[in-house]
Amino acid sequence: MTRDYIPRIADKILKERLEATGAVLIEGAKWCGKTRTAMENSNSQLFMQNLDNRTSYQQVADVKPSLLLKGETPRLLAEWQMAPVLWDAVRYAVDMRGELGQFILTGSAVPRDNVVEHTGTGRISRMTMRTMSLFESKESNGTV
């Protein structure tokens, strides 16, 4: 059963970031809506945590990570940190393609220290997402 998507304040922020940089990393606590919001704003998705494909995705990431980046843009890479090489692959792809709004990365955990070669500065924008506000859930009218 699929629930209807409730638009978030983060949607606007994400769209603005995609128009300004090659990729956006959405950070935040588990279950705050990172992946769902990214799904609503992406045109293709890769779910590294998919149990049926996780092992094959990891093998592809180890051999030729650029294959996992193929798809309509913006492309969501959910739980990218399961294959930290994807960070540098995204950074490189953003440089080579020279286009904005290529990728959205989500994940609740960070990879082990020193497994990412580059910070992503100028290529990957970081965005912090919080849990749904009372205004977003229509439990408040937003006035104080």
Image (cartoon, grey):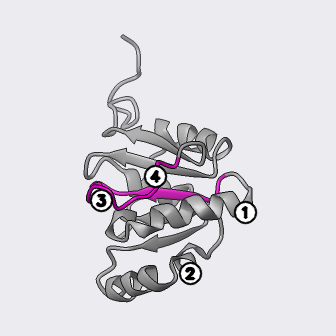
Q: Is residue 40 left or right of residue 79?
A: right
Please state which amino acid type lies under the numbered disc 1: Arg
> Which residue, given by chain and number where applicable, does mark 2 sit on?
67
Q: Is residue 87 above or below residue 71?
A: above
Q: Tag 2: residue type? A: Leu
Tell me which segment is drawn in magenta. Answer: 101-120
Q: Main secondary structure of the magenta part?
A: loop
Q: Earlier in the sequence, mark 3 or mark 1?
A: 1
What residue sits right under mark 4 in the picture?
37
Q: Amino acid at mark 4?
A: Thr
Q: Nearer the viewer, residue 126 or 44?
A: 126
- Disc nearer the start of the sequence (2/3): 2
Residue corresponding to mark 3: 111
Instruction: Give the mark nearer the N terminus: 4 vs 3.
Output: 4
Residue 4: x and y in percent read: 43, 57
For label 2, the crowd category at 10 Å Cα-Cα, with few meaning under 14, some 14 to 19 and many 20 or more, is: few
The structure residue drawn at horizontal position 57% and vertical position 52%, both measured from the top left corner, is: 23
Q: Dot 3, crowdedness within 10 Å: few (<14), some or many (≥20)? A: some
